[in-house]
Amino acid sequence: ETGVTQSPTHLIKTRGQQVTLRCSSQSGHNTVSWYQQALGQGPQFIFQYYREEENGRGNFPPRFSGLQFPNYSSELNVNALELDDSALYLCASSLYGSGGPWHFFGPGTRLTVL
Amino acid sequence: DQQVKQNSPSLSVQEGRISILNCDYTNSMFDYFLWYKKYPAEGPTFLISISSIKDKNEDGRFTVFLNKSAKHLSLHIVPSQPGDSAVYFCAASAAGGTSYGKLTFGQGTILTVHP
């Protein structure tokens, strides 16, 4: 069984730039969610994808967008980066219809915006 | 609007003793609760969960208690081990149709277990 993987592990960007983060779901899972974890805080839900469509969104602006591919891998794109976007970005995979909300997380991508 | 709260930022416990981590929630729609453990430079690792139809769930050294009337849950670790030192997050979810969507997390509690 392959766990959730994310790339890159670290990234440094400047304000105004765009970034793409990538995630491969755990094998057998069909749903992927993205979370932002600021320093000293708990993860905050950005959005979830199921069957390649957005299936719920948190309180994040439209410059945060995502994709899910047929193999259930996913991308998180952030446009017009702001300093406050500096955070750990976590991808989580789960199985829709499993009867519970068990999310399994990847190691995260640490994004620093200068 | 913090719907899930962990009011203790940190907890220090002696090896072999019990660790009790607490979590409060405000949203009555939450019907599933989870605990995650997080080490530095790693993603959160699922520990244990409980459905709102239960008041207790055990898995080895870990037990989660749910008090729905008080909107409170707790994680008990007995006996505590130095390897348990990590940040612990409480999370909650509400069923939407036939499946669950987002997790709402608390701020986390740093547990330190001293040898």
Image: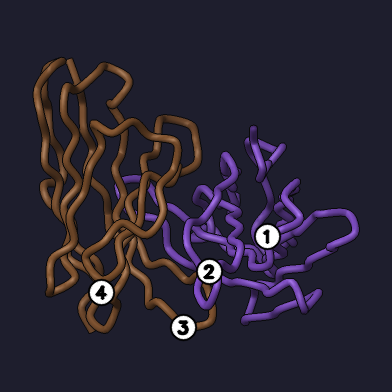
Q: Quadrant of residue B34?
A: bottom right
Identify the disc placed on residue A98.
3
Q: Quadrant of the C terminus of chain B?
A: bottom right
Q: Tell me if residue A18 comes above or below residue B72 in the rendering.
A: above
Q: Given the image, what chain letter belongs to the residue carrying mark 1? A: B
Which residue sits at x=49%, y=60%?
B83
Looking at marks 1 and 2 on the same chain, the residue that comes earlier in the sequence is marked by 1
**Residue density around tag 2, few if under 14, some if 14–19, many if 20 or more, within 10 Å:** some
**Residue density around tag 1, few if under 14, some if 14–19, many if 20 or more, within 10 Å:** many
What type is the residue that disc 2 sits on? Leu
What type is the residue that disc 1 sits on? Phe
**Residue density around tag 4, few if under 14, some if 14–19, many if 20 or more, within 10 Å:** many
What type is the residue that disc 3 sits on? Ser
Q: CA distance from mark 1 to mark 3?
A: 17 Å
Which residue sits at x=68%, y=67%?
B31
Q: Tell me if residue A43 comes above or below residue B98 in the rendering.
A: above
Identify the disc placed on residue B30.
1
Q: Are marks 1 and 3 in contact (CB under 8 Å)?
A: no
Which residue sits at x=36%, y=50%?
A47
Q: Are the residues under badges 3 and 2 in a single subunit?
A: no
Q: CA distance from mark 4 to mark 3?
A: 14 Å
